[in-house]
Image (tube, rainbow, N blue to C red):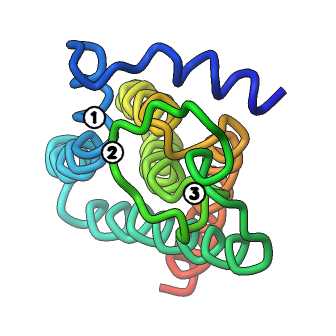
Amino acid sequence: MDIYFFRLINNLAEADSVLGLIGIYSTRYLIYLLAILAIVFLIVVFKKKERWWNTTRIFLSTVFAYIISQLIGFLYFRPRPFALLDGVNELIKKSPFEKSFPSDHTTGAFAIAFAVFLLNKKWGSVFLVIACLIGFSRIFVGVHYPLDVLAGILVGFLGAVLARWVVGLLDKKR
């Protein structure tokens, strides 16, 4: 099923098409837009005192998610689709020796998006849409399977929940 949905999405990709260029842009640069939007969100929505704890929460969400993702990748190595399958539309070049599971880009995007969502549903919804585009683009350009992306979403959520819990504990001790 994973390969079926991978092929369904990846077969839409053509490097020379406008859709292909959007996919390449999304997979490479939307993560930076998300980080910049997080900074804007923190400045616009929160007063100075609240900004510190919420910045810490978003930062820790990303750190925790990254650590979990790396541990999973260390324990279970899954090759990228283009390393195993024939006929993959590989729109960006990645090393076949890098892990595919879970998707680090998706993990980071959703760690930020869920952390923001837990702080503010309206802004968080925008972040989740952008994170979905990032996750989809990773399949589209041929570097991840759908399950890699779904695992990244779950790990990102876990990172955000852990960060919320840790910051809550730290804030109570203050």
Residue 24, by quadrant, is top left
Q: Position of residue 84 (x, y in %)?
A: 67, 50
Q: Secondary structure at mark 2?
A: loop
Image quadrant where residue 99 sits: bottom right
Residue 160's tag is 3
Residue 120's label in the rendered image is none
> Can residue 8 be spotted in the picture?
yes
Nearer-the-camera pick, 77 or 153 = 77
Residue in view at x 40 percent, y 58 percent: 94
Under tag 1, what secondary structure? Answer: helix
Tag 3 secondary structure: helix
Frontmost of labels 2 and 3 is: 2
Crowd tier of the residue under label 1, counting other residues whose Cα lies within 10 Å: few below 14, some 14–19, many 20 or above: many
Per the image, the residue denoted by label 2 is 92
- The CA distance from mark 2 to mark 3 is 29 Å
Mark 2 Cα-neighbour bin, 10 Å: few <14, some 14–19, many ≥20: some
Cα distance between the residues tagged 3 and 1:
27 Å
Point out which mark residue 24 bears: 1
Disc on the earlier residue, 1 or 2: 1
Q: Nearer the viewer, residue 52 or 49?
A: 52
* Residue 27 percent coordinates (x, y): 34, 40
Left or right for 88, reference 150: left
Which amino acid, mark 2? Answer: Ile
Q: Earlier in the sequence, mark 3 or mark 1?
A: 1
Going by the numbered disc 1, the residue's amino acid type is: Ile
- Is 160 placed above or below 123 here? below
Q: Nearer the viewer, residue 80 or 32?
A: 80
Residue 45's x, y, as percent?
A: 23, 42
